Amino acid sequence: MRMQFDKLAKLYGGALLNDVIPFWERHSLDRECGGYFTCLERDGTVFDTDKFVWLQARQVWMFSMLYNRLEKRAGWLEIARHGAEFLRARGMDDGGNWYFALARDGRPLVQPYNIFSDCFAAMAFSQFALAAGDDEARRLADRTYRNILSRKDNPKGKYSKALAGARPAISLAMPMILANLSLELDWMLDARTLDEVLDACLDEVFTKFLDPQRQILHENVAPDGTLLDCFDGRCINPGHGIEAMWFIMDVAERRNDSGTIAKAVEVALHTLEFGWDGKCGGVFYFLDSQGHPPQQLEWDQKLWWVHLEALVAMAKGYRLTGRKDCWRWYRKVHDYTWRHFPDAKYGEWYGYLNRRGEVLMPLKGGKWKGCFHVPRAMYLCMREFEKLAR
Amino acid sequence: MRMQFDKLAKLYGGALLNDVIPFWERHSLDRECGGYFTCLERDGTVFDTDKFVWLQARQVWMFSMLYNRLEKRAGWLEIARHGAEFLRARGMDDGGNWYFALARDGRPLVQPYNIFSDCFAAMAFSQFALAAGDDEARRLADRTYRNILSRKDNPKGKYSKALAGARPAISLAMPMILANLSLELDWMLDARTLDEVLDACLDEVFTKFLDPQRQILHENVAPDGTLLDCFDGRCINPGHGIEAMWFIMDVAERRNDSGTIAKAVEVALHTLEFGWDGKCGGVFYFLDSQGHPPQQLEWDQKLWWVHLEALVAMAKGYRLTGRKDCWRWYRKVHDYTWRHFPDAKYGEWYGYLNRRGEVLMPLKGGKWKGCFHVPRAMYLCMREFEKLAR
């Protein structure tokens, strides 16, 4: 298999360095106002200039990470700095909460209602601080991280439309992102904080969100883990579950905790099995745990990130456990993903396919797709296969 | 053509009385807790018991309206009362604002963030007051209507995520629903209020939301009618535009204003032309006015209400103007709609088809589809064709 792994490492590395990253280098920099354009047509033409903080921060993270972990290219650091300066100057309200969206010139457009803006900002400034040796950026990441910890039990705060106490619920997204974010910030956190946060995340995911019979994760449960029989409570987001599992494999690998690795791999495999579209191939976006109609009209679409997260999870799971199931599923998802998502003509990947795998929207970036899932998965899969090829 | 019109009137009347209304009579009443179930599987099985105030109110309106305008069936009045009592007891907060969602037992779940809950409640209690001779219901409709007028310039209020003043916008939904609602409440409003509100609605729709070149309506514009070059500002919702135009035909017919009728018909025709899917048939759900990728992932789906509103608009437009275009488009939409949406096996209509016209979700009711658009369009088309057959 070694040659096969080596070939795969080269496939991912080549796509990352010769296709995906150059696409964003070419099309996304706003030289006039700072920050990045993320709404890009198929050929890279900018079609909207609003700046969504999730995507601004993710691109800062991406270029900083490549600089830190792959190669010290001055150009990458400059691109990261280009976004970091814009975000640092314009991204926060007076309380240090990160807005959701800014106008092209940086004027705030949408309130800091979404705690994930803060999560991606913390990731961004942590990586950027490492890359640039910028201590102010480190302090900003640290302050943002503390703010997230203080808000995490009521992340929507005053922006919640639910009546307080009517049907309390917690979301998988919170412990899942915290696990990943805390590992990202490990270099600036004291060991005890890090361990406490990670323990709490793992415990919450496995005791509250996991369906122990079916080995799949619910998106929303009551605070004590009880199932909620409503649209949100029945919602299964396979891509999210699979992504959460490789975040947890990362935590467990760091701790040499093979029991947790085995659990995470098991759940990722069951989630793929549950979410796979037996008729058309690919992984569904949303399903109802009881088989009822899901709330989301886009439930049957095939999204780029879902498939990329599955590739990362299966490659990592295979390297960590050697389970044949992982390799079988890796191949199955690989075949679907590489056949349907890359755009041979203009580069980068399509984001949104319909159930049949046809392009639903030709954009390369928008309000939710930016310079993140594609290059991150390229980088991570490259690394997994490099290790496997050794 | 008279025989053809007569046949169509009978088609709609038969579907209304022998299929659609019996489906809701059979499956939607919650005899235990009051109100209606609206989340119904293909065969009518209840799959979720949350009570969404839009849909509760619309069903009260529907059964009251049939009682008032079609036939004094005691059973219909009882079904209307069943929902009206539930809503009256549980639907409002202390300030008289209507919640968005209630639990099965009536406990409020979701804040009154959405002014359209109030709009449908006012419609419901107005029709119910007429049907039941219930003066308390009339006062409730009146109070709710005044509350809507006072909130209409800032309908989202404290629930808005946009930063105040950052990029002010107004939405087509507001003047459009106010035109329809005000006609509904004409019997309880003084003539001057009614005329003022209707004048303002028509003026706003035609001077601010209308693209005079293309004769289609924008969903969101700046308060002075300037175009906004952002996702919301580029959004075209053809079904919404078409529905707004038959609301306005109603207002104009009442005023014997043939100029406004001609304008509304023209816009409805252009909107259908713009929104029609030349490849697969049917009307798209969302389009971008500049041809960019729309924000909504469900943009290419074919929704029941869009097609029903188009049938109403074309039948009405044809009766009022005799324009051949209206008849041509009526036939085209009729063929698509009657071929794809009705469920011959279990009754009622599917709500959500994919672009190709295949059933995307087999539900008959959910969070947004209830006992409203199908029976309302059946009733209205029946009436239009009865008039045409005379």
Image: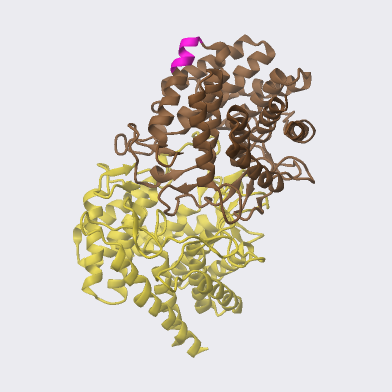
Chain colours: A brown, B yellow
Residue A368 shows in this picture: no
In-front residue for pair B121/A337: A337
For residue B388: magenta?
no
Residue A226 placement, left or right of B303:
left
Q: Position of residue B163 (x, y in %)?
A: 50, 33
Residue B88 shows in this picture: yes
The segment highlighted magenta reads A190-196
For image coordinates 61% across by 42% down, the residue present is A329
Relative to residue A62, is residue B343 depicted above or below? below
In-front residue for pair A160/A296: A296
> Quadrant of the rendered structure where residue A69 is?
top right
Total marks in image: 0
In-front residue for pair A175/B137: A175
Q: Position of residue B53 (x, y in %)?
A: 33, 52
For image coordinates 41% across by 83% down, the residue present is B10
For residue A194: magenta?
yes
> Quadrant of the rendered structure where residue A343 is?
top right
Q: Position of residue A354 (x, y in %)?
A: 61, 53
* Helix, strand or loop for the magenta stretch, by majority: helix
In-front residue for pair A169/B173: A169
For image coordinates 26% across by 57% down, the residue present is B35
